Amino acid sequence: MANMSPRWKFLAILLLAVVLPWLPLGSHTNYLLRVVTTAILYMILALGLNIVPGFTGLLDLGYVGFYGIGAYTAGLLTVHYNLSFWVILPLAALNGAIWGILLGAPTLRLTGDYFAIVTFGFSELVVLVIRNELWLTRGPMGLPGISPPVIFGHALKLDWEFYYLVILILMLVLLVVTRLEDSRLGRAWFAIREDEIAAQCCGVNLIRYKIIAFAMSASIGAMGGAFFARWFKFIHPDMFKFWESILVLCLIVFGGMGSIAGTMLGALILIPLSEILRAALPQAMFSARYLIYGLILVLMMRWRPAGLIPFDKEQESKAARVRERLATLGGKE
Amino acid sequence: MDAILRVRRLSKVFGGLSALSQVSLEVETGKIVGIIGPNGAGKTTLFNCLTGLYYPTEGQVLFQERSVVPELSSRKARLVQRLSWLFVIVSLAWAPLFWSFFLPRTFFKVELTLLAIFILSIRLVVVRGLREFQIWAWSTIFVFILGDLYLAIWWLTHLASLGPVPGLGAPLAYLALPWSFLAVVSCTYLGWQLLLREVRQLYGFRLGPDAINRLGVARTFQNIRLFLTLSVLDNVKIGAHGKMVQKIWNALCRTRSQREEEAKIEVEALEHLRFVGLEQRAFDLSGALAYGEQRRLELARALASNPRLLLLDEPAAGMNPQESARLMQLIRKIRDQGITVLIIEHDMKVMMNLADHIYALDHGVLIAHGTPDEIRADPKVIEAYLGRGSADAKS
């Protein structure tokens, strides 16, 4: 596995993911699928958040705000207008991006902690608006009765159907993120993270690239929210509390800040862990899972401070791939 | 003389410390020009002003006869200040005039008065708090638009609660609705034009470091600033950022033009790495390079943007004699490619061998300029380096 080329590794994992619903796992298959669907949803969220603190180096504590905006956009559009999921997904992404730009444009001049505080305030603001604007969101009563997505005239209801849908969205997000990372835009983000002054002197317009990062991150978060609303069929302001932001941030830190494979691995390990703990811990102690998350993070900081797959290791292997590509190119000529 | 860079009476004051005062210099195209001076002479401050990282207090910088840092003088600054004050006063006076004309009875309503005080205080804070003119002008516009739009919207949404207007009657009051919007829009537009046209002409707008880089000025740093967790090749590719044109959609769709540009940049980056002698390390992380190699990588990154003018901030610092001899050869080769080089250096031997023309700075003041031989003999330079009396002792 370790010495396979990334393309084959990717195909092997994809194959495993596709046949997963049909593996003979007995009566627990549906439960397992639901857990994996949640994990993949968090992978999408983590990939989106990763753009801001991972690629661009700005601490964003308000990511759940965009998740909530996406979920409520999808929920309200479904309940009132019954739009197709494939129309709602880009609309939610667009709405997320608009709010990302509106929040980012004035605040991205702030640095470090001040920026983090502003994003935190934004996510709280989103929850407050959702909770109090009863005419729009029904507030603390939640928004029930969101119909599931319809594909080719067939309304999704089985677990494996949603599982395939979320994998499809993950593929889309993964495509976007990997392509952006390996382009002029991605390099500009990395440059900003490493050294803002040097990046400016290399011709990178700081504000523009930070706003693009923020908008991309927000739109991916909103897409995750849209899927969540159509999957869960019920949304409530309490689902978009500050804790969720921290959880997604934990996934990134655990997996490796800035590394795409790392963030996905982090979500794949930590989210099912919560389910395992649900079974292992007594009912009254279920909230103690955050304690265990904290413990894991502390241990990580001690032994692997850069996460499971550190960013620089990923860059190293990327450079090695470029070297191979150029070597084969040179051989042909 | 064909000068690629002209600096006119550049001053930079930090608090009370004058880091640069009235420095004027010209850099001839295709030459190596050196800047020397003891520690704290303001050499790096000069570079930071030239690349847009600092905003000079006074003076002007022309790159290829184009104003990179607009001309600043206290006379013009005062004029702009007066203009902005006038603008603020007009924008402040507008609201009461507007009210008293259309809604005479509501002029003393508590909410409106509070609102007016609130807007007034914001405006005063903005006026007082911001020292840089450009920000100042923009925020005046911003506050003006925001405040007056808010007032207009408040007025429009509270028409019913204000009751009928004496002398106008209900229908006429509603006729005033579109008019009020017109007033807001036209006032804003006029103010905008005033500021944009007049202020830009008088004061000019500052170019950021990224825009200056895209014009063709690249630099290296005294304390090396590399992107340490990225590969050496990627570092150089980022250096080419300013001359690439592909947008986000092209990257998402991997269009043919995007792939071609990436391939072209990659070939050029390898070319630059070969030029500085780092092609063997192209696929290592730049954090893994030795100190001298990091310096050369910074040079390659600066060259990647195809600059017309290259600013080198102490490129030979911390290098042994062999390395600095190699660096000198490299810099000569860069000059032979037609790139003008402006260089700060402490190492006198390097400087005397390399530079065609030298400017000497001390405590932010230009004390001498000329060919290396003239500088070597200049008593003021010797005094700045060795102290008063040394020049006499030598002669």
Image (cartoon, rainbow, N blue to C red):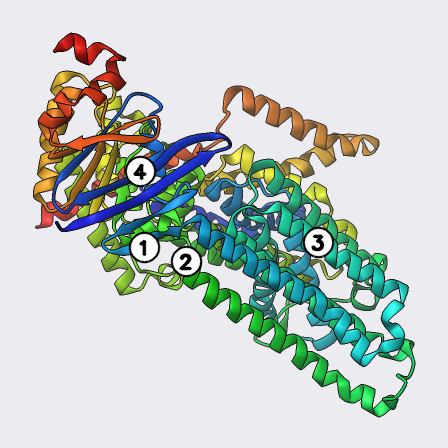
Marking on residue B334 = none
- The residue that appears at 50% across and 24% down in the rendered structure is A304
Question: Dot 3, how many residues are within 10 Å of its Cα: few (below 14), some (14-19), or many (20+)?
Answer: some
How much space separates mark 4 and mark 2, taking CA atoms?
20 Å
How much space separates mark 1 and mark 4, taking CA atoms?
16 Å
- The residue that appears at 25% across and 43% down in the rendered structure is A322
Q: Secondary structure at mark 2?
A: loop
How much space separates mark 2 and mark 1, taking CA atoms?
9 Å
Name which residue type carries label 1: Ser
- The residue that appears at 34% across and 27% down in the rendered structure is B223
Identify the mark nearer the N-term, 3 or 4. 4
In the rendered image, the vertical position of residue A197 relative to residue B353, given as above or below: below
Mark 3 lies on residue: B122
Nearest the eye: A158 or A218? A218
Subunit ID for the residue under disc 2: B
Name which residue type carries label 2: Gly
Nearest the eye: A228 or B346? B346
- Percent position of residue B267, x then y: 17, 48
Mark 2 lies on residue: B204
Query: Are callouts 1 and 3 both on one chain?
Result: yes
Query: Are callouts 4 and 2 both on one chain?
Result: yes
Using the rendered image of the protein, determine whether residue A329 is visible from the camera's viewpoint. Answer: yes
Q: Secondary structure at mark 4?
A: strand
In the rendered image, the vertical position of residue A28 relative to residue A73, given as above or below: above
Mark 4 lies on residue: B23
- Percent position of residue A159, x then y: 64, 57
Marking on residue B67 = 1
- Percent position of residue B365, x then y: 32, 31
Q: Is residue B151 left or right of residue B354?
A: right
Name which residue type carries label 3: Ile
